[in-house]
Image (spheres, rainbow, N blue to C red):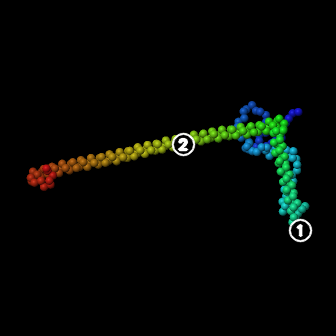
Amino acid sequence: MATTLPRITPIGTPVPRAVSSQPRSYSTPPTPSIYGPYPPRELSSSMDNVYVPGRINPLAPPPSKRRINMSWETSEQHLHNHKRSQLMQRREHERYHSAWAKAFYGSVAEQEYYRKHFRDVLKQQMADLDDKRKRNVKEKKKESEMALAQDDSDKTKDREAFVKKHMYLQTFRDSNKQTMEERWTNNKSNKFIEDRSDRERGRYNPINWTCSLK
């Protein structure tokens, strides 16, 4: 007797399909919620066809049991909601129990689908970890490149500032040197003129009044 796959149409679990000739890529999750809980909420169970009544508001019951001034009791409404809650809990427990039972006591196809789901999740985790490591390497590389570029820029600015300061100090030195040379020249010229004047004066007056001649 041929076995069939379980009737599952989950949001977070990929539906089994024929094997394609193209290798499957796990760089991105096949569905947004592949890491969701297993079994998914869309998994079928034996209580899917059980009718679950809707919840009613105890303070506003249906028209057939409308509250009047003489009847303010809400025990029937609360009992209705309590039974509804128990029924939903039983249905959820049955769904999870039947799903886990299929993984160990189900058909070969159901067991293989159970194992395939967790293999896909493990592969996706490995792919995400690899992508995270690659992103970290790229970010560190980019950070290193930015640091090196900033270092080169700082070195260039320091070099330009050093050259500018050197040129300023060199100009300041040349200006001081030129000022001192001009002062020395003026002093030498003034001394020569003063000595000549004293010699001329000494020719007519032998007394050295300025005491410049020794």
Q: Mark 1 vs mark 2: which is more N-terminal? A: 1
Q: Position of residue 43 (x, y in %)?
A: 82, 44
Q: Kindly identify which residue carries mark 2.
A: 146
Q: Residue at x 72, y 33 (%)?
A: 23
From this viewpoint, which residue is outermost toward the top? 21
Q: Residue at x 84, y 62 (%)?
A: 59
From this viewpoint, which residue is outermost toward the front? 104
The reply, left or right, for residue 39 in relation to residue 201 is right
Residue 53 visible to the viewer: yes
Q: Position of residue 58 (x, y in %)?
A: 84, 61
Question: Is the residue marked by circle 1 packed among few (<14), some (14-19), or many (20+) residues within 10 Å?
Answer: few
Question: The disc labelled 1 sits on which kind of residue?
Answer: Met
Tell me the CA gap for discs 1 and 2: 80 Å
Question: Is the residue marked by circle 2 packed among few (<14), some (14-19), or many (20+) residues within 10 Å?
Answer: few
Q: Nearer the viewer, residue 42 or 21?
A: 42
Q: Kindly identify which residue carries mark 1.
A: 70
Can you tell which quarter of the image residue 137 is in?
Answer: top right
